[in-house]
Image (spheres, helix red, strand yellow):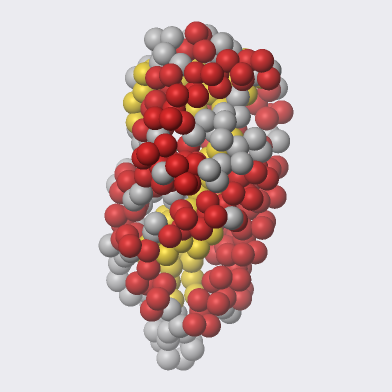
C-alpha cells in the first residue's frame, strides 16, 4: 500500500473543453490487487492501451494495480457502488456473490489450462456468469493466471503428512480452507498484499499461489520451500458495474467488447509464458523446489476426495458435473 496516497477517485477530469473535442470522454477506473508484471496486471494495461487506440482517446481506462485503491475484501462493494467501474477478482473471491464459484477452487478439478478454458467457454462458464447480474455486475471475460503451488518456511512438503500442524494463508474460500484441513493444516485468510508480511513475521508458515504471484511479490525471499503441485487453478472474472455498462453508448460497448476479446486471447498466451517462469524460481538459491510425482498426487487426491461430497450441495451437483 502507498501510505498517504490519496487517489483522485471522483470528480470531473479536465477534459470537457469544447475545443478538444473530448467533451464526452468516458473514464473507466479499473482496480486490481496484483503487480503490474503479472498476467492480470499486463492484461489490464494491454486492455487500456487497446481501448485508447480503438476509441481514439475518447475512452480512458485508468488502471490501479497492487490493491492501491481497494483490496479483495472491498473491491466488489466498490464496483457495486460505482466507485470503480471495472475489477477482475480471482474466482476464490467470488463465493460471497454465489457459492457456485467454489467449483473453481476444488483441488485437482482441472489438469491443465486448456481444460479450464474449455469449461469456462462452456456451460460452467455460462452458469458462473449468470450469477453476476442480480448483484449489479456485468461479467465480461475470464482471464487466466495459472495453477497454484504451495510454499512454506518449515519443511519440504511432499506427502499429506508433511502438512501436519502448519498454518497457511488462503484466499477467502471455504473450499481452500477445507483443502488444507484435509491435509492436517490450518488456515488464515488475509488480503493478497499482506502475504509477504504475514510470511515474514511468522503469522503463517506458508501459502499457495501461482508462479507469477510468488515471483512478483518476492514471496521466495521469505519462504524456504516450494512444492510444484498444480493442485488448483487461479483465474479471474473481469466484470463491469452493470448500470455503468448499460448506460454506455452502443458503439463504446462494442469497442470495449472487441478490446476485451483481443486482450483475453493475449492474456491466455501470456499466462502460459508466466507459468514457464518456473525456471526462474528453480534457479533461485533462496528457495528449494520439489515437484510432485503422479504417485504423490494420488495421495493428495485421496485426502481431497471427501471435499467433492462435502461441497456438492453447496455448489450444486449439476454444476459439479461440468468439471472435466
Ligand atoms: C491471491 O489473493 O492470492 C490472489 O487472488 C491474488 C490475485 O488476484 O491473483
Q: Is residue 162 visible?
A: yes
User: Which residue is at the far bottom?
Assistant: 19
Looking at the rendered image, the quarter that the C terminus falls into is top right
Residue 189 shown left or right of residue 291 in the figure: left
Based on the displayed image, in which of its 4 quarters is residue 216 positioned? top right
Which residue is rendered at x = 62% and y = 60% of the image? 263
Residue 29 shown left or right of residue 5 in the figure: right
Which residue is rendered at x = 50% and y = 8% of the image? 161
Based on the displayed image, in which of its 4 quarters is residue 247 positioned? bottom left
Residue 187 shown left or right of residue 324 in the figure: left
Looking at the rendered image, the quarter that the N terminus falls into is top left
Q: Position of residue 217 (x, y in %)?
A: 51, 34
Q: Position of residue 272 (x, y in %)?
A: 68, 43
From the viewer's perspective, is residue 3 above or below residue 154?
Answer: below
Q: Is residue 169 visible?
A: no
Count numbered badges in the picture.
0
Which residue is rendered at x = 46% and y = 61% of the image? 139
Residue 250 shown left or right of residue 313 in the figure: right
From the viewer's perspective, is residue 126 above or below residue 198?
Answer: below
Q: Position of residue 85 (x, y in %)?
A: 39, 64
In front of the other: 154 or 220: 154
Which residue is rendered at x = 33% and y = 62% of the image? 134
Amino acid at each position: 500500500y502507498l501510505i498517504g496516497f490519496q487517489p483522485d477517485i471522483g470528480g470531473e477530469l479536465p477534459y470537457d473543453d469544447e475545443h478538444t473535442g473530448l467533451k464526452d470522454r468516458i473514464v473507466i477506473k479499473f482496480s486490481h490487487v496484483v503487480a503490474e508484471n503479472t498476467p492480470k496486471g499486463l492484461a489490464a494495461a494491454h486492455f487500456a492501451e487497446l481501448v485508447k487506440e480503438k476509441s481514439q482517446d475518447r475512452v480512458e481506462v485508468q488502471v490501479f494495480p497492487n490493491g492501491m485503491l481497494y483490496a479483495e475484501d472491498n473491491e466488489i462493494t466498490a464496483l457495486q457502488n460505482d466507485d470503480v467501474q471495472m475489477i477482475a477478482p480471482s474466482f476464490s473471491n467470488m463465493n460471497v456473490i454465489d457459492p457456485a464459484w467454489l467449483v473453481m477452487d476444488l483441488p485437482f478439478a482441472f489438469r491443465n489450462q486448456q481444460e479450464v478454458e474449455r469449461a469456462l467457454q462452456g456451460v460452467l462458464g455460462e452458469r458462473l456468469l449468470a450469477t453476476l447480474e442480480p448483484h449489479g455486475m456485468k461479467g465480461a471475460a475470464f482471464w487466466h493466471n495459472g495453477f497454484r503451488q504451495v510454499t512454506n518456511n518449515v519443511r519440504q512438503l511432499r506427502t499429506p503428512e508433511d502438512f501436519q500442524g502448519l498454518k497457511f494463508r488462503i484466499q477467502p474460500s471455504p473450499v481452500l480452507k477445507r483443502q488444507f484441513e484435509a491435509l492436517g493444516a490450518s488456515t488464515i485468510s488475509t488480503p493478497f498484499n499482506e502475504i509477504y508480511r504475514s510470511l515474514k513475521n511468522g503469522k503463517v508458515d506458508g501459502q499457495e499461489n501461482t508462479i507469477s504471484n510468488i515471483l512478483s511479490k518476492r514471496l521466495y525471499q521469505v519462504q524456504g520451500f516450494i512444492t510444484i503441485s498444480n493442485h488448483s487453478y487461479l483465474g479471474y472474472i473481469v466484470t463491469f458495474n452493470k448500470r455503468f455498462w448499460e448506460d454506455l453508448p452502443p458503439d463504446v460497448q462494442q469497442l470495449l467488447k472487441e478490446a476485451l476479446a483481443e486482450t483475453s486471447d493475449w492474456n491466455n498466451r501470456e499466462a502460459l509464458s508466466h507459468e514457464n517462469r518456473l525456471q526462474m524460481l528453480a534457479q533461485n538459491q533462496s528457495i528449494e523446489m520439489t515437484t510432485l510425482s503422479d504417485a504423490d498426487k494420488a495421495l493428495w487426491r485421496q485426502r481431497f476426495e471427501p471435499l467433492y461430497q462435502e461441497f456438492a450441495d453447496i455448489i450444486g451437483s449439476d454444476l459439479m458435473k461440468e468439471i472435466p
